Image (spheres, grey):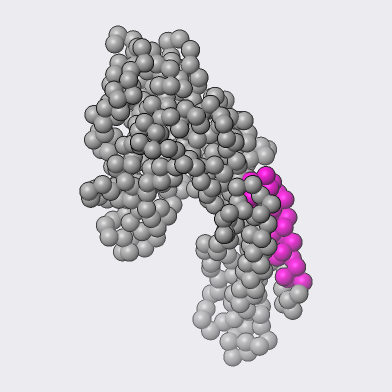
Amino acid sequence: MKPSDEAILQAVADGFEEQVAFLSDLVKIPSQRGDEAPAQDYFARATRARGYATEVFPIDLDLIRDHPGFSPTTISYDNVVNVVATHRPRQETGRSLILNGHMDVVPTGPVEMWTDPPYSARRDGDWLYGRGAGDMKAGLSANIAALDALRRLGLQPAATVYLQAVSEEECTGNGALACMARGFEADAAIIPEPEDDMLVRANTGVIWFRVEVSGKPVHVREAGTGANAIEATYRVIAALRKLEAEWNARRFSHRHFGDLDHPINFNVGKIEGGDWASSVPAWCAIDCRIAIYPGTPAAEAAREIEAAIAAAARDDPFLSNSPPKIVWNGFYAEGYVLEEGTAAEETLAKAHRTAHGKALESFVTAGYLDGRVFVIYQGIPCLVYGPLTENIHGFDERVSLSSLQRVTGAIALFIADWCGVEPIDGA
């Protein structure tokens, strides 16, 4: 019953322009944090049109607040939704699968610094441009198009498949966690993140936090009698840079990370402070991100961050009397390692070789991935594997369409092998 690999890849090719049109429509719908609902609605309408039982639901904090994978949040989730579309076979003979992707995208930055408007979805040769084109609406299109290719052959998976479009991947990971808490589990998962045609072997966890520093405001003519909160914040940043260096020095004791020059990256992503150019600033706040190694609990890393800031404050004439305040306001997430030798990886390696004409490579990444929800908390292999992209989180983000087609083909081949296939009713 299983069609030839060539027939599956041809079915992907036959539907690829339709897939690109779907991707372009998604890119044109802004879906930054808190504004994901319109794009999620578009995705849900697409899955319902294909006959999949589709649920749209908000992230339920009561279900995940006490879970070890939960990340603290500072925003309301009233309008932040996940979408899960479910395929059920006529007879469950294969292995079940989750096809996951995130709908949320990062801010665009100054739009005048883009060549074209960020949500234009401009197509130029092999590239499709736009915020979220690569990270990761291309992956969402691959998930749905891989199933479409089998349908084009009159076939469907002979196992349960969940299509997940989640929110909050770029800031907490709570969307994927909420799906798991609602009972959506399977034998394996694929997340087509923008990974340049490779498989992620391991990734870091991530912690977000805000440091708030109070100063003593005076007129600038008497600056020496006050305390500049902005300048004091520089000293806090220096302490965190020192911690970053200490953590990077530990890389040799962490499997898969010893060969990386700088796996732990600390970033001050936002700074604000002061009220008046002629007043010594009374306040300053920085929003920070730092990576942590797999196997390091977020709470343990948080204690080291607190200790580093406290030590810097004790040695500072001003901060010793006005200690900085730390607020955990996003990612509080561990990294993971995908162990080698699983049947899921072997199946993907075979599919990749057929679709790409070369062996599947794996690598280690220093960024957050929702794969941790599946590997750590569900105990299943999660294959984070996706197309070639450039400038994600930057200006002129773009995805290679030829790479996207090959990745979609590999996912379709994987589904046919992993889940098995059966005729669609009436086909």
Our reading of the magenta stretch's main secondary structure is helix
Give the quadrant of the C terminus: top left
**Where is residue 288 shown, x and y percent of the image?**
58, 60
Left or right of 103 on screen, residue 303: right
Q: Is residue 384 magenta?
A: no
Front residue of this view, candidates 52 and 278: 52
Q: Quadrant of residue 182?
A: top right
**Where is residue 357 shown, x and y percent of the image?**
35, 36
Front residue of this view, candidates 319 and 301: 301
The part of the chain drawn in magenta is 289-314
The image shows residue 330, relative to residue 354, as above or below, that is below
**Where is residue 341 shown, x and y percent of the image?**
57, 31
The image shows residue 50, relative to residue 377, as above or below, that is above
Give me the residue at 38% from left, 38% from top: 358
The image shows residue 250, relative to residue 220, as above or below, that is above
Give the quadrant of the N terminus: top left
Front residue of this view, candidates 128 and 256: 256
**Where is residue 4 shown, x and y percent of the image?**
32, 20
Give me the residue at 62% from left, 83% from top: 218
Tell me if I can see residue 53 in this picture. no
Q: Is residue 306 magenta?
A: yes
